[in-house]
Amino acid sequence: MAEALRVALAGLGTVGGGVVRLLDANRDLITRRAGRAIEIVAISARDRTRDRGIDLSRFAWVDDTSALATHPDVDVVAEMIGGSDGPALTLARATLAAGRGLVTANKAMLAHHGLELAEAAERAGAALKFEAAVAGGIPVIKGLRDGAAANEIARVYGILNGTCNFILSKMEAEGRDFAEVLAEAQALGFAEADPTFDIDGIDAAHKLSILASVAFGTRPAFGDVVAQGIRHVLGADIAEAAALGHRIRLIGLAESGPDNTGTGGLFQRVHPHLVPLDHPLAHVTGSTNAVVAEGNFVGRLLFQGAGAGEGPTASAVVADLIDIARGEYGPPFAMPAASLTMPRPADSGERRGRAYVRFMVEDRVGVLAEIAAAMRDAGVSIESLIQRGATQDGRVLVAIVTHDGPERCVAQALERLRGSQSVAGQPLWMPILG
Amino acid sequence: MAEALRVALAGLGTVGGGVVRLLDANRDLITRRAGRAIEIVAISARDRTRDRGIDLSRFAWVDDTSALATHPDVDVVAEMIGGSDGPALTLARATLAAGRGLVTANKAMLAHHGLELAEAAERAGAALKFEAAVAGGIPVIKGLRDGAAANEIARVYGILNGTCNFILSKMEAEGRDFAEVLAEAQALGFAEADPTFDIDGIDAAHKLSILASVAFGTRPAFGDVVAQGIRHVLGADIAEAAALGHRIRLIGLAESGPDNTGTGGLFQRVHPHLVPLDHPLAHVTGSTNAVVAEGNFVGRLLFQGAGAGEGPTASAVVADLIDIARGEYGPPFAMPAASLTMPRPADSGERRGRAYVRFMVEDRVGVLAEIAAAMRDAGVSIESLIQRGATQDGRVLVAIVTHDGPERCVAQALERLRGSQSVAGQPLWMPILG
């Protein structure tokens, strides 16, 4: 039996604590699978005194987190601190500079600094692994990097944020509105006190930019992800979608342009979509995540499982440690950093598809004509239109499904209606997943 | 750039042809991802003259397939011949004995000789990879071996045979009986002229024994898989299942006994199941495959995709070649062969669950009483019972759903009814997936 893989653990929150517990619970099995033991030798966290229900006295305690990078007798640092910059980034840089492996669950750091870290890892010949950064326990990074490696990927998309899916599913099941369900989710601990990163799609955008890099051989380009969250989805939208045979899901979607080398334009968007009931993502409820990859030989692959939580995230972190213990790791983004192309953001206006557009309008003569005229003048072909009776505030819901067409046209129609006296608030446009 | 990985290809049927086409189509991308080119240098197949729509003149043609094992300048042999023994096994043994890597899609060979081949690969320090052997294009071997590696797996199960799922979905959608749909599937080329391996669950059993080995750290034990196929499923069963909120799927399921080390009993069965509509497997239709693994930290993981066909299977084969080109391979069954335990077949009688039992009975007084008494005497508690009016042959369908209980009791009840004058033919028992 080879010597143990020695791990330094930075951060003892939900994920870090889970890693300790998992390595304790499945110790023998992991040793058999990895071909050697995996042992935590040193830890660092903000508060040494907090009771986490784990015996920490076995590990060397290090006050200065960044010192883990050069702590003696450490092979790999597991960074479970979080945050795109600050102590996590300092530790990551120092770890790789010291020629040691790095395992991280930090999607924000990878979205912003992934290329730099991959280059540093390659220079040092060290491992950089981040299965837990995307979709929690689902091995989707391995699924794309290894499992689908033979394929040109046309698009990769999925449900990447469990909080949003929990809220949308609950709105759907109980016929309630966003704000109410969010408040309840916060009370239950399913949503953060400051839910912005989740609710506004930023967390999903971080993950999408990582998935896109692995899938398309492009540098992570978080800045190019256009993200809109679920704040503006009404209970009424969910009901209309249901009547049309769809469910609303927050989907992160990355799609490669025509030449599909990453140079032909890469489209990345997080946005609520209408998902048809015959699509597996329509049946993903609660905090579950799911990712679909479409390859030119394999066709459609689906990976589904728990997107967050102590156990699933720890499972992904330790899977990465096992890869390292086995010596089975290579370029982090599925190919050498120098081979990653710089993606050109694709023009979303050129994308074609069907869409749902919902207006809240004043209940008076001529409103429908005004909307219909704007659609016509922008070249939008209407497949169906539903107008529902007035709500308590005297407003009327108008939901339109467009025929297949360029997104540009719908955007132009909405632009024409901007400032209209008839339309109350912002209309909600959502693509229909094709 | 490192030197190319040189591949000898044995067999040019659907899978072999697909591998050639994939390596041609995605050549540059694969080189970037693998860090080196992957090149076929020699081929062997039964018929040199057959037109396969591929230019084979680029490759050295070898008449004696087994000679590929020692053909000069070959790093890896890709065995796409099939069959548990014969030329495939001869080639596999010779390849590993020569210290070369082996990639195979051959589930029958692995089910029967997996342990021997794994030992040979380890002795030689050579790769043995078989992603394509289970569930076609779905990277479920990698998903279990690598992705879920940190978990103790409680059970692994799924839809492992596309032909059966195609037939069951079609029976379901069109309300037709098995024989009729099978004949049509054969005419369309979706089922083999001799469909026994698919229809009777043997193909699924091969795959299940491989999955179980990787999931539980046990030696492949195909002989312990109890397999029953879909021949006896009636259109009427599908209708009854639907009325109960279920769909019928042929499920291969492996479950580890209480101590979950593989020594506490391993249960392996292929059998039609009733799957509740809120389970993702209920929504898998057509020839799609899907596998679920339940881990003690990750929870329920689902992998879904195309289970067969040229493109998907080639995708899995080439993914394995990429692993080898990257040098990212290790023990084939997720741990060294010497660590694999010998599984003790679990006693299915002790398994608990709900079940569906269907009888075709004569339409006369006392039949229901006889069945109900047999159930009672065997200690089976009945949750619901439906009797449908007589069919054209004067028989009556009786469908029972049992409460949760040991399988042994239902088996005893059926044993009591054996030889009854009232019951026509063999009753059909199907577990309800819990």
Image (cartoon, coloured by chain):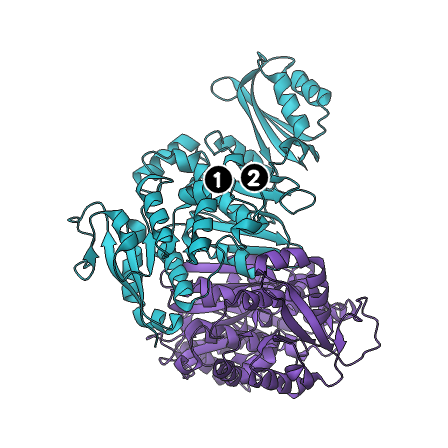
Chain colours: A purple, B cyan
**Relative image position of residue A381 (x, y in whole percent):** 41, 71
- Coordinates of residue B251 in the picture (x, y in percent): 53, 41
Q: Is residue B178 left or right of residue B66?
A: right
Residue B50 - label:
none
Q: Is residue B287 above or below residue A417?
A: above
Q: Chain of mark 2?
A: B
Q: Residue at x 27, y 65 (%)?
A: B24
Are discs 1 and 2 less than 8 Å apart at CB?
Answer: yes
Mark 1 is on which residue type?
A: Ala
Q: Is residue B25 visible?
A: yes
Instruction: Specify few, some or many for label 1: CA neighbours under 10 Å numbering under 14, 14-19, or 20 or more.
Output: many
Residue B205's label in the rendered image is 1
Assign the N terminus of chain A to one quadrant of the image: bottom right
Q: Which residue is mark 2?
A: B268
Q: In the image shown, does B347 or B399 lie closer to the viewer? A: B347
Residue A308 appearing in the image? no
Residue A120 higher or lower than B243, as above or below: below
Which is nearer the eye, A298 or A257? A298
Query: Whole-percent x and y of residue A283?
Result: 57, 56
Instruction: Report the side of B2 relative to B351 (left or right).
Output: left
Determine the image quadrant of residue A230.
bottom right
